[in-house]
Image (spheres, grey):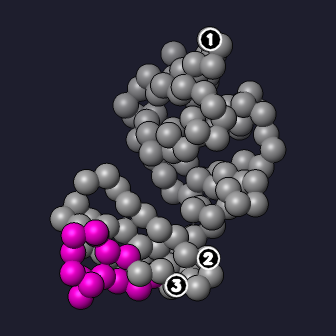
């Protein structure tokens, strides 16, 4: 089962797997995040930085406490690029950042400076490596 998440900015949403009875559903309210677990059971979390999931509607990409490996798919979609992290330790470093109208090179400069890394580009393919390599 793919990871299903719903972040609610206003109102409320009922969350359940299609084949599950309505009694196995959860209500996700404004400011909360709902997820379906691997078994299909809904879980609701509150007190999260919901902006991480909703900022794109205002033209921002917010990365909050993710590992670089978790952030890469979002960065790839946002910047229409393929990003490879060439080091497992680098991939596990935590990222917290907000990008508004930065170009791909501006984002990469800021990200690699914060992570102690450097980047190499070939067309739309980017490779991130530790700065000491």
Spatial separation of the CA atoms under disc 2 and disc 1: 38 Å
Tell me if I can see residue 42 in this picture: yes
Q: Provide the residue designation for mark 1.
A: 122
Q: Residue 123: percent from the left, percent from the top?
A: 65, 13
Furthest toward the left, the residue is 39
Q: Provide the residue designation for mark 3.
A: 12
Confirm whether the magenta stretch covers residue 21.
Answer: yes
Q: Residue 120: percent from the left, percent from the top?
A: 61, 16
Asked whether, in this view, residue 11 is left or right of residue 67, the answer is right
Point 37% across, 76% down: residue: 15
Q: Which mark is residue 48?
A: none
Q: Secondary structure at mark 3?
A: strand
Q: Nearer the viewer, mark 3 or mark 1?
A: 3
Q: Which mark is residue 9?
A: 2
On the image, which quarter does residue 42 sit in? bottom left
Q: Residue 78: percent from the left, percent from the top?
A: 64, 41
Above or below for 86 versus 57: above
- Image: magenta residue range: 15-28
Which quadrant holds the N terminus? bottom left
Above or below for 90 versus 121: below
Point 47% across, 68% down: residue: 6
Point 72% across, 54% down: residue: 60
User: 70 or 55: nearer the eye?
Assistant: 55
Q: Assess whether mark 1 and mark 2 are in contact (beta carbons under 8 angstroms).
A: no
Spatial separation of the CA atoms under disc 2 and disc 3: 9 Å
Of callouts 2 and 1, which one flags the residue occurring earlier in the amino acid sequence?
2
Spatial separation of the CA atoms under disc 3 and disc 1: 44 Å
Confirm whether the magenta stretch covers residue 22.
Answer: yes
Point 71% across, 36% down: residue: 107
């Amino acid at each position: 089962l793919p990871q299903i998440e719903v972040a609610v900015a206003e109102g409320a949403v009922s969350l359940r797997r299609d084949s599950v009875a309505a009694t196995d559903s959860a209500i996700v309210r404004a400011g909360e995040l709902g997820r379906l677990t691997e078994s299909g059971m809904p879980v609701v979390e509150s007190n999260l930085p919901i902006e991480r999931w909703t900022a794109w509607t205002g033209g921002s990409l917010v990365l909050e406490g993710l590992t670089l490996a978790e952030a890469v798919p979002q960065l790839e979609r946002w910047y229409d690029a393929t990003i490879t992290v060439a080091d497992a330790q680098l991939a596990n470093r935590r990222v917290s950042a907000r990008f508004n109208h930065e170009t791909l090179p501006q984002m990469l400069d800021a990200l690699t400076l914060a992570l102690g890394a450097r980047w190499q580009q070939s067309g739309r393919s980017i490779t991130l490596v530790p700065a000491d390599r």
